[in-house]
Amino acid sequence: MWIIGIAAFLIVKREVPDGNFLSVDDANLAALVAILDVLVLVMFVLWVIALARLARQQDWEWFTGLLILQLVGLGIIGMVAYAIAGPIDVDLSKPGISS
């Protein structure tokens, strides 16, 4: 998703006159901007879901790491690390399951 976003940004930056992204006259570029908006929204929702899940699990180390990395602009690193090595979601409310 990041590669697509960066490529789209570079295409739009090259094609839009005066660097004003609000004055897109080409329908293809307008669609590209709309796709970028959707991708940003999806990524934000997934990030919020990951943070909510970590808060529910009370895994504050991962929560803090993801939050700080996102706030300093390195959120993709935190999300990839979370996807690869993040905590397993265990429902502790079921009988017989312990942490």
Image (spheres, helix red, strand yellow):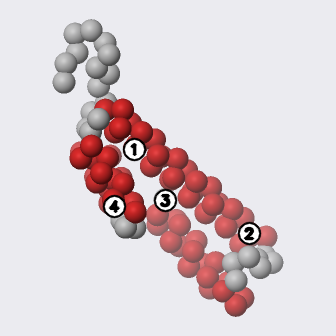
SS assignment at label 2: helix
Residue at left offset 64%, top offset 78%: 12
Q: Distance between the residues labelled 1 and 2?
A: 32 Å
Q: Which of marks 4 and 2 is nearer the N terminus?
A: 2
Badge 2: how crowded within 10 Å, few (<14), some, or many (20+)? some
Q: Point out the frontmost of discs 4 and 2.
A: 4
The answer, for residue 15, to whether it is visible in the render is yes
Q: Answer yes or no: do the residues labelled 4 and 3 have beta carbons within 8 Å?
A: no
Mark linked to residue 23: none
The reply, left or right, for residue 86 in relation to residue 38 is: left
Query: What residue type is disc 4 on?
Result: Leu
The quarter of the picture where residue 29 lies is bottom right
Q: Earlier in the sequence, mark 4 or mark 3?
A: 3
Q: Point out the frontmost of discs 4 and 3.
A: 4
Q: Answer yes or no: do the residues labelled 4 and 2 have beta carbons within 8 Å?
A: no
Q: Which of marks 3 and 2 is nearer the N terminus?
A: 3
Point out residue 91 in the picture as x, y percentages from the top left corner. 32, 21
Q: How far apart are marks 4 and 1 (CA)?
A: 12 Å
Task: Report the number of discs.
Answer: 4
Q: In this view, does 79 lie above or below 15?
A: above
The quarter of the picture where residue 34 lies is bottom right
Mark linked to residue 30: 2
Residue annotated with mark 1 = 51
Point out residue 54 in the picture as x, y percentages from the top left corner. 34, 39
Residue annotated with mark 3 = 1
Residue annotated with mark 4 = 69
